[in-house]
Amino acid sequence: MNDQSTHDHEKKASAISAVALVRDGMIVGIGTGSTAAYAISELGRLVSGGLDIMGIPTSYQSEMLAIEHNIPITTLLEHPEIDITLDGADQIDQNLVAIKGGGAAHTKEKVVASAASRVVLMVDSRKIASRLNHAVPIEVLPYSRTLVERQVRALGGIPNLRMAARKVGPVITDNGNFIIDADFGVIDDPERLNREINAVVGAVEHGIFLNVDEVHVGTADGARVLKR
């Protein structure tokens, strides 16, 4: 099995493990990204077998996948209290602090996570780190880009506007905003950085997630579960 196949296997294993937590009658937050896609597929399989749930997607991509798999969809307006949210991550440290936003959906992901009684992340083994050093995605209002970049530099970060791969210009989020990937090197105090970025004028939301309840890490023969 090559590296990519191994990572895909681990992603699928972590998703299946996390989805096993879902019960009849739950309102489920549905994350975004490649690992979340495996979870959506597994949820769809269970729904076709009679599982009674409703999902709240965190992006257009996840909503389309959920519809494709016949998962009933609802909104936070209708269900402001969520039982569980299942999502991926870009990096997670030993204290279960995560960096998310590789799919440019972290604003909606954080809103949904904040409404959830239980936040469960699903990752392959590459995503676990002793200390965070992944760039922190920051969603910004387009006209505030240069202002945010200046404030990020003042915090010791290196800001990079995320450019689109298949269009000219920057990535545009589902909310119509830009993404700045801010490289802070090794993040020794993510709680402090969380507070500092929260105070950045023009920033909509950032990708540091502090309130993670458990992480399902895919392995060759299933998944191991990390809890607070």
Image: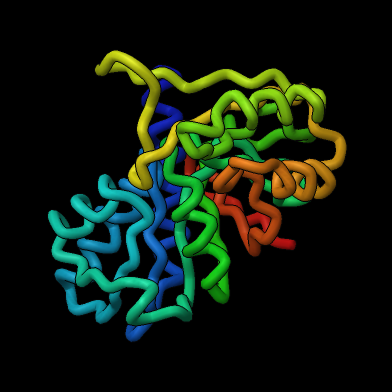
Specify the quadrant that holds the C terminus: bottom right
Q: Nearer the viewer, residue 153 or 124?
A: 153
Identify the residue shown where x is 65% and y is 64%. Answer: 213
The answer to whether 139 appears left or right of 198 in the picture is left
Q: Residue furthest bottom?
A: 25
Q: Is residue 21 above or below residue 94?
A: below
Identify the residue shown where x is 41% and y is 65%. Answer: 29
Q: Position of residue 88 (x, y in %)?
A: 48, 46
The answer to whether 27 appears left or right of 141 in the picture is left
Q: Nearer the viewer, residue 78 or 155?
A: 155
Q: Is residue 3 above or below residue 40?
A: above
- Residue 12 seen by the camera: no
- Residue 9 seen by the camera: yes
Q: Position of residue 98 (x, y in %)?
A: 65, 45
Q: Position of residue 137 (x, y in %)?
A: 57, 34
Q: Position of residue 149 (x, y in %)?
A: 65, 25
The answer to whether 157 appears left or right of 88 in the picture is right
Total marks in image:
0
Identify the residue shown where x is 51% and y is 61%. Answer: 111
Residue 34 is drawn in which quadrant? top left
The answer to whether 122 appears left or right of 127 in the picture is left
Specify the quadrant that holds the N terminus: top left
Q: Is residue 215 above or below residue 178?
A: below
Identify the residue shown where x is 36% and y is 41%. Answer: 176
Q: Residue furthest front?
A: 143
